[in-house]
Image (cartoon, helix red, strand yellow):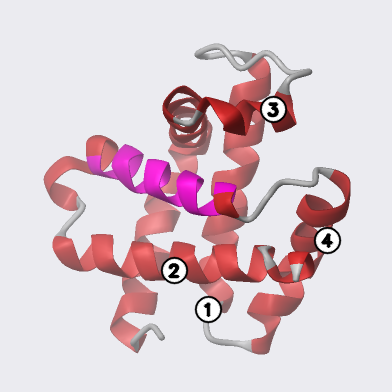
Amino acid sequence: MLSARERELLIELWDRLTPAAEHIGSEALLRMFTTFPKTKTYFAHLDLTARSEHLRSIGKRIVEAIAEGTRHIGTAQFTANLSYLSRFHAYQLRIHPTNFKLFNHCMLVTLACYLGEDFSPRAHAATDKYLSAYAAVLAEKFR
């Protein structure tokens, strides 16, 4: 799936993004909720306005989880580490797997805006592959 160079690139990229996790994650979520309003149904009880505490908190947790996952790409531990999140999203939050794909798209757009020229075509492609694999593991419990 991912080459050794792509894995290294992803680890470097997400390590660099982690200090801005709250900003990047909340922006990607806000972008998703704005562009795809039906995705808000799972979060109707939360304040989803720009810079809200809920949005920043959830966004930060998402980016930190994605960053942590880069360290385990291509190993059995990758799936094992995400199994809790897969169960949580399937059975407690009941988020449909289609929303993971929508979020991935919004995350890519957010990263392109945030990183500008530093988000090279190679980094974009590697991130897209990685986020797709991440979403596939999260969606496993829906099958």
Q: Residue at x 54, y 72 (%)?
A: 71
Q: Residue at x 51, y 71 (%)?
A: 133
Q: Position of residue 76 (x, y in %)?
A: 67, 87
Looking at the image, which residue is at 58% across and 77% down? 72
Q: Amino acid at mark 3?
A: Thr
**Tag nearer the camera, 2 or 1:** 2
Which residue is tagged 4?
A: 87
Circle 1 residue: 73
Within-10-Å neighbours for mark 3: few <14, some 14–19, many 20+: few
List the residue tagged with mark 2.
130
The residue range painted magenta reads 99-112
Give the spatial CA distance, label 2 vs label 1: 8 Å
- Say which residue label 3 marks: 41
**Foreground mark, 3 or 4?**
3
Kind of residue at disc 1: Ile
Q: Quadrant of residue 49?
A: top right
Disc with the residue nearer the chain's start (3 vs 4): 3
Residue 41 in percent (x, y) is at: 69, 27
Q: Earlier in the sequence, mark 3 or mark 1?
A: 3
Q: Nearer the viewer, residue 99 or 28?
A: 99
**Which of the 4 quarters of the picture holds residue 14?**
bottom left
Q: Nearer the viewer, residue 94 or 1?
A: 94
